[in-house]
Amino acid sequence: MTERTSITPTHRYRNNDKAVGVGNAFWDMSERNGLAGIVAELQDGVLHTPEGHEFVNFTCCSYLDLDSHPKVIDGAVDALRRFGVLDHCIPRSRVQIPALLELEASLGELFGAEVVSAISAGVASAGLLPLIASGHLGNGTRPLMVFDKYAHVSMAGAKPACADETEVVTCGHHDVGFLEDMCKRYQRVAYVVDGADSLGGYAPVQELAELQEKYGLLVYYDDSHSVSAYGERGVGYIRSHCPIRDERTITVATLNKAFGTSGAAILLDGYAKPAQRVIERFAGALSYSQPMNTAAVGASLASAEIHRTDELTALQGRLRAHIELFDSLIKTEQTGTTYPIRVVPMSDETVIEAGRQVYEAGFYVSPVFFPIVPRGTAGLRVMLRAGQTEEQIRALGAVLVEVGALPEEAAP
Amino acid sequence: MTERTSITPTHRYRNNDKAVGVGNAFWDMSERNGLAGIVAELQDGVLHTPEGHEFVNFTCCSYLDLDSHPKVIDGAVDALRRFGVLDHCIPRSRVQIPALLELEASLGELFGAEVVSAISAGVASAGLLPLIASGHLGNGTRPLMVFDKYAHVSMAGAKPACADETEVVTCGHHDVGFLEDMCKRYQRVAYVVDGADSLGGYAPVQELAELQEKYGLLVYYDDSHSVSAYGERGVGYIRSHCPIRDERTITVATLNKAFGTSGAAILLDGYAKPAQRVIERFAGALSYSQPMNTAAVGASLASAEIHRTDELTALQGRLRAHIELFDSLIKTEQTGTTYPIRVVPMSDETVIEAGRQVYEAGFYVSPVFFPIVPRGTAGLRVMLRAGQTEEQIRALGAVLVEVGALPEEAAP
């Protein structure tokens, strides 16, 4: 028998050998130290493990604690009772019950946009980005697709599919100069970037708007980390600051973080009905797979209602106060920003042990270290929420200092 | 100013120009004739449009009508009340509430497999197939990935990502001979195929099992159209007939069709914990995006309980009786099979008008025609369900004959 062929991969846009190789070491180390693979019951905002340990989660993205708001849960229950199914299983392009349309109308009013729902922001991006790559979403011109180096994996994962529809390149983080060069060279450019980064920081919306005006740059934002937590009625960072409200800006946002429910919203401006039909029919899983279920729809309708009231302003205020309180205790690169995420610097050698001690003291913060971030930039990622108490934040601050965090000098 | 560059796409694995070009014509034609874009309220199994039209849906994949089973809806409500959130938003590889683990234990018992849950079968495939391509799921050898020509788009859509991790080819429908040739030439081959096709028909499980035994072929099945509807306790066609229960067989199935809820199940055998961790950590959206929400978990736990009782057998029996009744009325290529889908042949010229008349008579069946299927193979797709009545099926049969369907000769 002749030798059977083995295969050499191209690894142009992805590399599982590397991802699994380095990533698994990170996760195994985290899990061996009890900082991953934790199972716990949630009761009144505190997590309880079967072994009897209790802790407050400081790595939960439900920044306003709307996920456990009684009205949100009641909204889910009401919709289940009202529609009588989680989903009437048939593509919505054929027949749909009014659930998604009601939700999209409500979110459309809230965000001041045309809204298309999706089961997750990842599914939305996986479906939309190839349509942008082929020019079917946009102005009809096939663009050069420029992915920001730090674009979340839910967007970066679409590179191979996009690369079969157009040219794909990756640029430095927020490298506006590179984008302008590309805008001069290509008939059209589309830039893919987070509105708010998962390690803190916002997209350079104003500079990008200038390129949008000057060259017709299309910007695709994932604003999942700022929607609800930021802006009037929680419209998020991008809808608060981006002046370009036409086909040149497309924003997706999960409803699974500060919004407190499940699913995602695609926010569009200036796309006529035929373009929305193209999304419904051809944006990947949006056309062929299950949509948001009615429980998620009902919860989201209830959350949207809360977004229209002073309660949202109050929750945002409480979140902001908690961020400021934390900043008054611990020094980080994010100090002074509106962003609910802080990375507390630790050395590569101590970060895991520090995370373990913080967990034992009753707080879960997530250690990030090489190879997840470059050597020398390790830290404990802290997420503030409206639902934490001042006492909890002060206690966390105290234990963080004990394990080596830099106290804010002005701290009491 | 110099001419700015335009781009020529590679279109190796996908082509939006073609997909949108031909697909939009199909959908526009369907919608102009009132057979797509329908919005209707569901009441007691009948759909009601705002215009006052009533119809029974014969293109709904909830083959056992478990989607509206009171216990399924109650299960969703109970879980919402019990967990108090739709999702505690943090990657489950870090911290999770026990919801998904309970579900996976229950489904694992039901299917006799190790089960990993996913928000949809599409998300499962998009996450798993690149890991199979790189050899991280399987036996460690990077396989040639062979996609069946008719593999559902939720699998075929992963070709570009897989092609960056290994070689990808497409083979004729169920072309076992081609697969054997490839098995002789490559160290390892993985074949991607539907367990049960969306236009009727099953995968050649026995012939594939021979290749699995002889060459170590890995087969990736999507059995979404047969789970619950087929087999003891609804384990589906593949789990009923595939004798290979180890790393060489991976099956995914939606919980959104006959199972009656939301989400999906990945069914594994012989994969040790580290492999399951690799899925949890690196299978695309399974690692970074939202999981099944608690309403879907609760509904699925309730549906799994029904699967363990005689009620499931009774529902399967009713579905089978409805299929047989339909077969006694209308001749199709699927006549005599256990499959709940029938395509009633029509000419390309008459299929739309036929679908319109059937709809006006109170039944939604979905027309399929060029370019969705080849010219000369147009038809009205009918899906039987346990929850339809004999009277409805007889009435549909009568109107189908009126619009040109071939009556079964033995029909009364």
Image (cartoon, coloured by chain):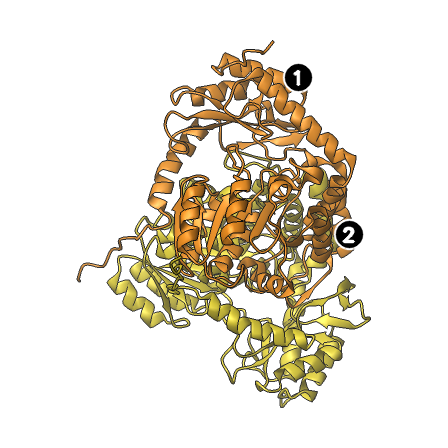
Chain colours: A yellow, B orange
> Residue A122: which disc?
none
Q: Looking at the image, which residue sits at the far left?
A: B2
N-terminal of the pair, mark 1 or mark 2, is: 2
Q: In the image, is A138 to the left or to the right of B96?
A: left
Q: What percent of the width, then of the height, locates residue B27?
A: 43, 33
Tell me the quadrant of the picture where the N terminus of chain B can be found: bottom left
From the image, state whether disc 1 or disc 2 is nearer to you.
1
Observer-nearest of A123 and B126: B126
Density class for disc 2 (Cα within 10 Å; few <14, some 14-19, many ≥20) is some
Observer-nearest of B201 and A39: B201
Observer-nearest of B270 and A19: B270
Q: What percent of the width, then of the height, locates residue A215?
A: 30, 60
Query: Residue shown at 40%/48% (left/top)?
Result: B181
Density class for disc 1 (Cα within 10 Å; few <14, some 14-19, many ≥20) is few
The answer to which image quadrant residue A191 occupies is bottom left
Three-letter amino acid code at the position of disc 2 = Arg
Q: What percent of the width, then of the height, locates residue B323?
A: 62, 24
- Residue A199 visible to an observer of this rendering: no
Three-letter amino acid code at the position of disc 1 = Glu
Query: Chain under label 1?
Result: B
* Residue beneath disc 2: B81
Query: Residue shown at 58%/42% (left/top)?
Result: B224
Up-down relation of residue A200 to residue B208 (above or below) = below
* Residue beneath disc 1: B391
Q: Looking at the image, which residue sits at the far top?
A: B412
Q: CA distance from mark 1 to mark 2?
A: 40 Å
